Image (spheres, rainbow, N blue to C red):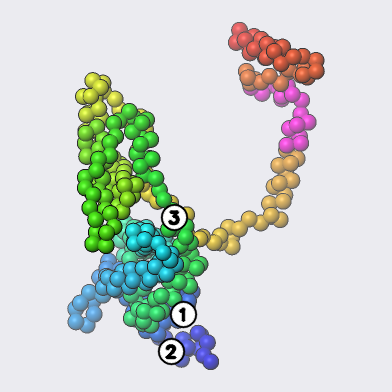
Amino acid sequence: MLTGRDLIDRIKLPFRKEKELFYSLRAILGFYPHHIEYYKLALMHKSVARRNAKGRPLNNERLEFLGDAILDAVVGDIVYRHFEGKREGFLTNTRSKLVQRETLNRLAQEMGINQLILSSTRSSSHNSYMGGNAFEALVGAIYLDRGYDACMQFMKKRILSQIINIDKVAYKEVNFKSKLIEWCQKNRVNLEFGLVSQTKEDNGSPVFVYRAVLEGKEAGTGKGYSKKESQQLASKEALQKLRREPQFIDAVFAAKAERTKMEEEPVSTVPSTDDRQDFIISKPKADERPDRQADAPRRDARRRQQAEAEAAPQGGAAGEEHDEFDLSDITATPKEMSREEIIAMAEAAAFSSEK
């Protein structure tokens, strides 16, 4: 049976860098590619501006399109089977969290895909979605190289069993409504949620549309399968609008000033709507793991310093700046003085130091 290295040697890759790419892809995907050209194209950003013999641009945009469709199907299949009996709205929401751009960007970073992307230096520093796009393109490459089943196994065995906690993703909820209410209360801004519409889908599932209104100004609209979900989405859109549009927040406070006949500035920073990716299972690197033996000398030194500090005279070293709140000279114990007497002595010491 051929090993991975035997396979590479038999293929007789012409360049050392290409062999290194084989090994890197094996570590990321869990298998060796059959057709390396698909994967090389998946890792080629459009900023490189290469063209084939027919003059057509060579980049990963077409593979990204294909991978996006395959990823939706694969993740939808996995979510459907994993959460048996859950309603369509829950399944859709969970799939969206798994394939959203922020999640794919984090996956690309955790798996080392970012280091393999071929791009111009300027683009790599300014394009925050490059890693997520390359991840989708790699899924497209897997599909063309090995088929749908290989994409399914890659997501199940490499992603959802080792890197992402699917249950934590599904039940993770960021309470944007609570954040918006808290900000409005701190700034004494009027907030209202109004029902825009309530309809039903063909299967009978209710659909709600709510609007968040700040001081009479429309701030955000949300559509969901429950009142809670639609108000959450409306609140998220309102927070994003407050953070990104200074003119909107000015209009809100102008309306508030008109209502209260007072001019005020915001007293509280608008909360962020960025989701914490705490469902990513990150393993500490070898050089980041704590070494208790290496820390032992420092712990011993800290213990010696603490012991010396406790043994030192209470008055402090000569020339040391006096702490006017230091009441260490009160040495009476509760048996000798009452609590009221101790407090009285402390107050007397404090007042005497002010003279």
Residue at the front extreme, as displayed: 204
Query: Could you tell me the amino acid type at mark 1?
Result: Phe
Q: Which residue is mark 2?
A: 12
Characterize the local packing of mark 2: few (<14), some (14-19) or many (20 or more) Cα atoms within 10 angstroms: few
Query: Could you tell me the amino acid type at mark 3?
Result: Tyr
Q: Are marks 1 and 3 in contact (CB under 8 Å)?
A: no
Q: Residue at x 24, y 32 (%)?
A: 215
Asked if the magenta segment contains residue 316, the reply would be yes
Tag 2 or tag 3, which sits nearer the N-term? 2
Main secondary-structure element of the magenta-colored stretch: loop
Q: Which residue is mark 3?
A: 171
Q: Nearer the viewer, residue 84 or 100?
A: 84
Q: Which residue is mark 1?
A: 31
In the rendered view, tell whether residue 284 sits above or below residue 295.
below
Q: Quadrant of residue 266?
A: top left
Q: Secondary structure at mark 2?
A: loop
Percent across and percent down for residue 124 are 34, 61
Q: Secondary structure at mark 3?
A: helix
Query: Could you tell me the amino acid type at mark 2?
Result: Lys
Q: Are marks 1 and 2 in contact (CB under 8 Å)?
A: no
Q: Nearer the viewer, mark 1 or mark 3?
A: 3
Q: Nearer the viewer, mark 1 or mark 2?
A: 1
Tag 2 or tag 1, which sits nearer the N-term? 2
Distance in Å between CA atoms under marks 1 and 3: 32 Å
Q: Quadrant of the C terminus?
A: top right
Q: Quadrant of residue 155?
A: bottom left
Characterize the local packing of mark 3: few (<14), some (14-19) or many (20 or more) Cα atoms within 10 angstroms: few
